[in-house]
Image (spheres, helix red, strand yellow):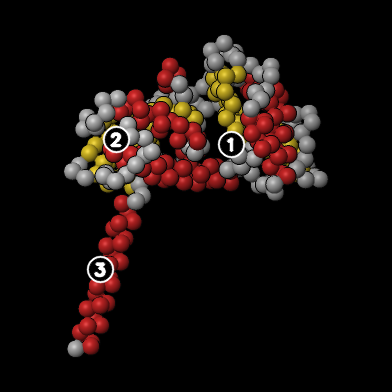
């Protein structure tokens, strides 16, 4: 009798673990189509939203998309462009929301804007909780559930992008131009320089990239010094520069591997480099790399 009871308890424990495992899967986003391992090659995005029209709010897209763009930017996944610049974005994040009896499903298709090739798909399913409270009586339960699903998708996307960036940094660096003046060493025998490059979607000459690198060198040097003060010597500081059609620098996004909230980094982010221009609207990514002499 005791043996039967023990077996029964063992089977019950196994079933409980299986059930718990199923619940865990609902709390994370699932790759319905594998994400490319080259996400680090893309820096900017546009967001498109489609709904099954089951939402109570007729302006669901109007309210949800700006929130989602803010989360994408806040978490450093991509840099969302303004509505009138969407055609310049390197990837389009196509969101599709649908609702069942007690849950919502949010799908994300990451698409290369230029080639229109899918780079992977993610899906997150969230239960619509009648007791959920977003802190605003005007927020529908569906919106609360969609935001939860979106955060789970961004968890996965952020993880995959960081993995891609780490892989890219381990790859052999391309041949660098001659070091710019005043490139301070991280160590006694290291010589540092700013190197800029353009994504495939942007046209930029090597000469222009070198001029921009010279113009932002002081900013990059400041980022390097800030990271060194907190022991982050292995982090390669980088910035994404977006230039307007008249060639003026419009926006600078700083990428310092999770140290963006440091006071010295915030100070540098608030000051755009002066007299840095291009011949047309373009995107440039600049890194401050050091080599042993």
Residue at 49% over, 30% down: 79
- Most distant residue in the bottom direction: 1
Q: Nearer the viewer, mark 3 or mark 1?
A: 3
The tag earlier along the polypeptide, 3 or 1, is 3
For marks 2 and 3 on the same chain, the one whose residue lies earlier in the sequence? 3
Residue 87: x and y in percent read 42, 20
Label 1 and label 2: CA atoms lie apart by 35 Å
Would residue 192 appear left or right of 46 to someone viewing this image? right
Residue lying furthest front: 137
Please state the total of marks drawn on the protein image: 3
In the displayed structure, does residue 230 sit left or right of residue 137?
right
Q: Which residue is mark 2?
A: 140
Q: Kindly give the residue lying farthest to the top in the view shown.
A: 246
Badge number at residue 63: none
Residue sitting at 32 percent across and 44 percent down? 132
**Disc on the earlier residue, 1 or 2:** 2
Q: Nearer the viewer, residue 275 or 285?
A: 275
Residue depth check, mark 2 versus mark 3: number of the one nearer the observer = 2
Looking at the rendered structure, the secondary structure element under dot 3 is helix
Picture quadrant of residue 254 = top right
Q: In the rendered image, is residue 245 in sight?
A: yes
x 43%, y 16%: residue:
84
Q: Position of residue 195 (x, y in %)?
A: 66, 31
Q: Nearer the viewer, residue 116 or 273?
A: 273
* Number of the front mark, 1 or 2: 2
Distance from the alpha carbon under mark 2 to that under mark 3: 36 Å
- Residue carrying label 3: 15
Query: Residue 72: horizontal and vertical position, in percent?
Result: 45, 35
Disc 1 target residue = 255
């Amino acid at each position: 009798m005791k043996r039967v009871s023990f077996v029964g308890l063992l089977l019950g424990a196994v079933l409980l673990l299986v059930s718990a495992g199923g619940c865990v899967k609902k709390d994370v986003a699932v790759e319905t189509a594998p994400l490319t391992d080259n996400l680090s090659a893309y820096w900017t995005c546009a967001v498109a939203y489609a709904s099954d029209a089951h939402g109570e709010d007729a302006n669901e897209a109007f309210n949800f998309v700006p929130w989602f763009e803010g989360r994408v930017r806040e978490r450093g996944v991509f840099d969302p462009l303004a509505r009138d610049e969407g055609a310049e974005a390197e990837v389009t994040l196509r969101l599709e929301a649908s609702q069942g009896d007690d849950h919502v499903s949010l799908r994300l298709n990451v698409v290369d804007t230029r080639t229109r090739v899918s780079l992977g798909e993610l899906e997150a399913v969230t239960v619509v909780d009648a007791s959920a409270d977003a802190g605003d009586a005007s927020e529908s339960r569906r919106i609360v559930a969609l935001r939860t699903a979106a955060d789970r998708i961004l968890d996965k996307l952020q993880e995959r992008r960081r993995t891609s960036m780490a892989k890219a940094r381990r790859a052999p660096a391309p041949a660098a131009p001659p070091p710019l003046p005043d490139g301070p060493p991280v160590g006694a025998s290291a010589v540092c320089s700013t190197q800029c490059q353009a994504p495939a979607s942007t046209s930029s000459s090597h000469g222009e990239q070198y001029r921009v690198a010279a113009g932002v060198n002081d900013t990059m040097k400041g980022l390097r010094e800030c990271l060194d003060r907190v022991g982050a010597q292995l982090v390669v500081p980088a910035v994404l520069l977006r230039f307007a059609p008249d060639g003026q620098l419009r926006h600078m996004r700083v990428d310092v591997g999770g140290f963006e909230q440091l006071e010295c980094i915030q100070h540098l982010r608030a000051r755009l480099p002066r007299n840095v221009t291009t011949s047309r609207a373009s995107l440039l990514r600049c890194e401050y790399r050091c080599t042993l002499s």
